[in-house]
Amino acid sequence: MSDLELIHGETKQLDIAVVDGNDAAVDITGSSFWFTVKRDWLDADADALITKTVGSGITIDDAPNGSAVIDIDPADFAAFANEPVIYVWGLTEKDASADVHRLARGTLLVSPAVQEVIP
């Protein structure tokens, strides 16, 4: 499991590096990915607060070297209150052979945004 922290309303990129048991890059050509943020592990995918897929928030930027990026945008926080809350997240891959791999999961702390006046 892995913990993530985001500030409410921020723009952030989360790097994905798919590696095998020897830390060698895995070719992800033809793979699909799903990134979801939910209130609880048992929530249905349809109830996810954030859902990202390839072409809709996930970009495969170097398939032969197992590299992709998840884009988090301010609009993704529309369902979140601007207060500290802990959610759960998961990242799943379906490779070109249709094998499903649970790549990572963990908790996500969404911290409130602090309004700053910029001179």
Image (cartoon, rainbow, N blue to C red):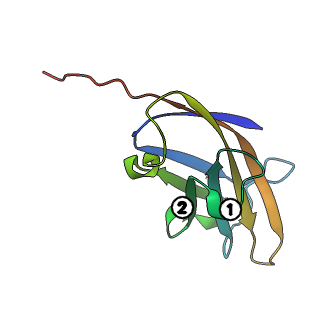
For the image, the number of numbered tags is 2
Q: Is residue 12 left or right of residue 21?
A: left
Which residue is tagged 1?
A: 45
Which residue is tagged 2?
A: 58
Residue 41 placement (x, y as % from top left): 76, 47
Residue type for callout 1: Asp
Q: Residue furthest left?
A: 119
Residue 52 placement (x, y as % from top left): 56, 60
Secondary structure at badge 1 equals helix
Q: Residue at x 45, y 46 (%)?
A: 77
Q: Is residue 112 left or right of residue 31?
A: left
Marked residue nearer the N-terminal end (2 or 1): 1
Residue type for callout 2: Ile
Q: Residue furthest right?
A: 21
Rendered image quadrant of residue 116? top left
Q: Residue at x 48, y 53 (%)?
A: 71
Say if mark 2 contacts mark 1, CB within 8 Å.
Answer: no
Camera-side mark, 2 or 1: 1
Q: Is residue 8 above or below residue 44?
A: above
Screen quadrant of the C terminus: top left
Screen quadrant of the N terminus: top right
Q: Residues within 10 Å of mark 1 (few under 14, many from 20)?
A: few
